[in-house]
């Protein structure tokens, strides 16, 4: 099915997006990085807006897209701050927990019904996160008492909310994927620019020891996210697509970012972490079975 291939394409770009995001956030202020991620998509899509392929829409039709921008920005605030402070081999698997939240919300609110094997996958993934909590204590202190671990989980939860809301926008309200991608990034750019100016005016960022320094890598982050989101919106726009399955496939990007963290930038290795990672992948495979 074409929407499954599109979801895997999204996962490919999302994996390298996670890697470049980690580098861009290293010892850097978070709000400007957020802004450049969103603004890059606006710049890429602006010619399509000028050509009339992305329409101006009425104020009442803008409101649902503005709500999506608020949800995604909130998710980014938590997850970007966590990524800036934690190892990639810890944050990437936590971010992959979004499918768990998505499945529950899709069942409760969208009428989706996961198969038997998908429920098995949920149980395997939950056990794997317990193993990660054991592995993470040596690197982050007590796993679930570390505020950035909790921030990463909250970011994943809000990301799952965004995923379910995307299905509502694209399948129920019948928005065009390109229109949603352009306008919600416009709104995110406005919100994030305002917050960036606010913290600059007060001469501080979310973290006092983090000052903004522009790096061209920030544009690459936005570029990779543009393609990841483009394939994702096209997949979810298909009327046969299940958001619970699309999200699971999309979060298989964890394979790329986890292996990069372990083998390329030489983050802390442990047998427990490998076992937990393997469990998460196995759980995602079960979840993705239909």
Image: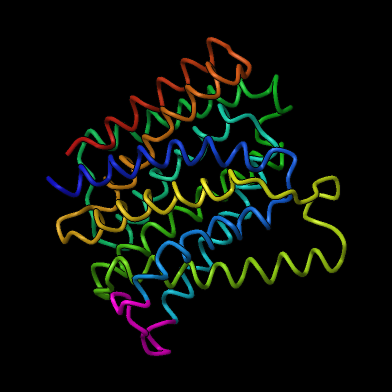
In the displayed orientation, state which residue is furthest to the left: 1
> In front here: 80 or 53?
53
* Residue at horizontal 51 percent and vertical 39 percent from the top: 18
Which residue is found at the position 64% from the left and 38% from the top? 149
Residue 60 shown in magenta: yes
121 magenta-colored = no
In magenta, the rendered stretch is: 50-62
Direction from residue 285 to residue 146 in the image, left or right: right
**Relative to 152, is 281 above or below?**
above
Report the front residue among 175 and 181.
181
Indicate whether 70 appears above or below 133.
Answer: below
Please identify the residue farthest to the top as the structure is shown. 271
Query: In the image, what residue occupies the spot 66% across and 68% down?
Result: 193
In the image: residue 46, left or right of residue 108: right
Q: Residue at x 50, y 68 (%)?
A: 69
The x, y position of residue 275, in whole percent, is 46, 15
x, y (%) of residue 191? 61, 71
Q: Quadrant of the N terminus?
A: top left
Number of marks in the image?
Answer: 0
Q: From this view, report whether residue 140 is shown above or below residue 208.
A: above
Is 24 positioned to the left or the right of 146 in the image? Answer: left
């Amino acid at each position: 099915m074409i929407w499954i291939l599109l979801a895997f394409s999204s996962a490919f770009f999302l994996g390298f997006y996670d890697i470049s995001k980690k580098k861009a956030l290293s010892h850097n202020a978070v709000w400007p990085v957020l802004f450049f991620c969103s603004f890059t998509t606006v710049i890429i899509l602006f010619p399509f807006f000028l050509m009339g392929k992305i329409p101006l829409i009425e104020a009442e039709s803008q409101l649902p897209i503005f709500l999506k921008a608020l949800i995604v920005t909130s998710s980014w605030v938590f997850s970007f701050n966590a990524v800036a402070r934690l190892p990639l081999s810890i944050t990437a698997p936590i971010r992959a927990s979004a499918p768990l939240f998505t499945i529950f919300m899709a069942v409760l609110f969208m009428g989706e019904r996961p198969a038997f094997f998908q429920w098995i996958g949920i149980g395997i993934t939950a056990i794997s996160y317990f193993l990660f909590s054991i592995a993470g204590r040596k690197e982050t202190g007590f796993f679930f008492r570390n505020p950035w671990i909790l921030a990463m989980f909250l970011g994943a939860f809000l990301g799952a909310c965004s995923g379910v809301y995307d299905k509502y926008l694209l399948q129920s309200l019948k928005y065009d994927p390109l229109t949603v991608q352009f306008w919600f990034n416009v709104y995110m750019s406005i919100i994030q620019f305002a917050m960036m100016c606010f913290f600059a005016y007060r001469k501080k960022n979310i973290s006092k020891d983090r000052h903004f320094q522009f790096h061209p890598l920030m544009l690459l982050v936005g570029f990779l996210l543009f393609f990841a989101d483009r394939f994702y919106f096209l997949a979810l726009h298909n009327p046969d697509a299940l958001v619970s399955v699309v999200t699971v496939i999309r979060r298989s990007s964890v394979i790329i970012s986890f292996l990069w963290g372990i083998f390329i930038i030489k983050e802390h290795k442990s047998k427990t972490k490998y076992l937990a990672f393997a469990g998460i992948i196995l759980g995602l495979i079960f979840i993705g079975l239909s």
